[in-house]
Image (tube, rainbow, N blue to C red):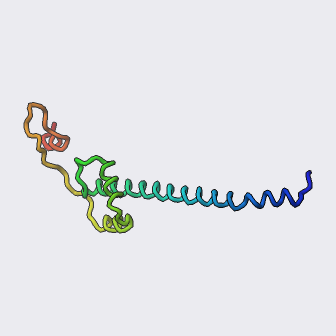
Amino acid sequence: MDSVDKNSTREVLSQVPAVLRALMAENVKLAAALEDHTRQDEAEDLVSIMDAKGVTDRSVPFKKKVAALLASKKDLNVVREALSLTTPDMSFASLSDDGPSGGDSTNAFENFILGD
């Protein structure tokens, strides 16, 4: 094992501040990325709950709803609390705008009622 002399110690100690700054910068960058990822996951979870409760427009794509929620910069904890106060979607059927278009316009609920 080599002995430690003053010059090698001085060289190592001179590199410490730059290495610490680089590690701190990387740590801040990774913490921000983790926060963004966590917020994205929470927004996706909230939009899923909104869809299940019938609060959102079902014609809007899921990713677009998530992006809109994230862009709103709303506190997601407040949104979650508000969702806990809403009732679940209790609708059993929905009206169709399609009408008779030459095809079979019945859905599973209509088939059940009709006994098909």
73 versus 107 height, above or below: below
Q: Quadrant of residue 22?
A: bottom right
Could you tell me which residue is drawn at 31 percent across and 55 percent down?
68
Between 85 and 39, the one lying in front of the other is 39
Q: Is residue 28 left or right of residue 43?
A: right
Residue depicted at 75% across the width and 60% down the height? 14
Could you tell whether 72 is left or right of 4 in the image?
A: left
In this picture, is 87 found above or below 92? below
Q: Which residue is rendered at x = 56% and y = 60% of the image?
A: 28
Q: Nearer the viewer, residue 79 or 100?
A: 79
In percent of the image, x 46 and y 54: which residue is there? 37
Q: Front-most of 46 and 64?
A: 64
In terms of image quadrants, where is residue 15?
A: bottom right
| Left or right of residue 28, residue 92 in this image | left
Camera-side residue: 2 or 5?
Answer: 5
Judge left or right: residue 82 versus residue 39.
Answer: left
Q: Position of residue 75 (x, y in %)?
A: 37, 66
